[in-house]
Image (cartoon, coloured by chain):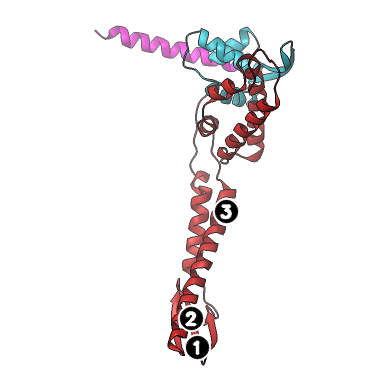
Chain colours: A cyan, B red
Amino acid sequence: MLVLTLLRDEPTYGYQLVTRLRECGLSDVSTGTVYPVLTRLERDGQLASSLVASELGPARKYYQPTETGLTALIEARRRWDALGTVVHAVVKEQP
Amino acid sequence: MSTPANRTLTLSDRWERYWYLDDVEMSLDALPRAQRKEILRDLKANLADAAMDVGMTQAIRDLGTPRALARQYQESEPRLHPTWGIGLTSAAVMFGVVVAFTMLYWLGATDALLQQGEGTMSTHVFGIPAQIWVDSGSIRSEIGIEGAGYIPWLHLTLIALAFCCGSRIWRLWRHTTVSG
């Protein structure tokens, strides 16, 4: 969900996405965790990729969500909110 | 090794990436060939992108060990497949071991008879009936032909077992689903 959200906001290449996730507070997240997710989401049709010329060197592979990905994101967000509501209610009841 | 300031991949960078990806591929045997190629293609592109920011050595270090990375890819797959290639290799190795042990046993038995000068030995080698004759220095032997309908069950079982273990054939029935 986080990957799709960040890529929806701004198409990004793999390493930059990891950097953005770290800046968001996931300081322990590694490229070894994120790259497999990108590969799977792209194969599932939730992400599309394109090569974008870079001033620093060879063209970079940028990812962005497809319509399928955006639909999946909405569904994931709905389930996350529902779970969050339940967790919040349970925790609030505890002393 | 390139630094971020170099921006382009040097020969050393490509060499470093090649060996890393080679190790990853070896650990991805459980996945279909097409899927492995797709993963390696993506990984290659992502490593090139990361190398422009932090250098190839750091980019590879961030990924962790090839085996750990391969595990991450496999765990993100909806289903693990049997490793037929390893299964066939295991079965072939087991076949070789069985043949080698059979030959060694036969040579040992023949040598023992030669020490005596002459004699006949009826025995079983891994369950296969065998006969060896030594007569005045000449050797005749028969292995596994006493019964026309003889089936070497022990051999077949060992080879089949090696194939099943090597190919992780139980993955045909066990479905592993991991959410991303």
Alpha carbon of mark 1 to alpha carbon of mark 2: how far? 8 Å
Judging depth in this view, the residue of B161 and B114 nearest the camera is B114
What residue sits 63% from the left and 36% below the top?
Answer: B36
| Residue A74 visible in the current orientation | no
Q: What residue type is labelled 1?
A: Val
Q: Upstream in the sequence, badge 1 or badge 2?
A: 2
What residue sits 60% from the left and 26% below the top?
Answer: A40
Instruction: State yes or no: residue B41 in magenta.
Output: no
In the rendered image, residue A60, in percent from the top left (x then y), is placed at 70, 17
Q: What stretch is highlighted in magenta?
A: A71-95
- Mark number, residue B110: 2
Q: What residue type is labelled 2?
A: Thr
Instruction: State yes or no: residue A73 in magenta.
Output: yes
Res. B21 image quadrant: top right
Do the residues under discs 1 and 2 have CB atoms within 8 angstroms? yes
Q: Indicate the secondary structure of the residue bearing disc 1.
A: strand
In the rendered image, residue B111, in percent from the top left (x then y), is placed at 47, 80
What residue sits 34% from the left and 9% below the top?
Answer: A89
Relative placement, left or right, of A10 versus A32 is right
Q: Which amino acid does label 3 sit on?
A: Thr
Q: Upstream in the sequence, badge 3 or badge 2?
A: 3
Relative placement, left or right, of A34 versus B115 is right
On whether disc 1 and disc 3 are found on a single subunit, the reply is yes
Alpha carbon of mark 1 to alpha carbon of mark 3: how far? 38 Å
Total numbered badges shown on the rendered structure? 3
In the rendered image, residue B7, in percent from the top left (x then y), is placed at 69, 15
**Label 3, on which residue?**
B89
Q: Which of marks 1 and 3 is in front?
A: 1
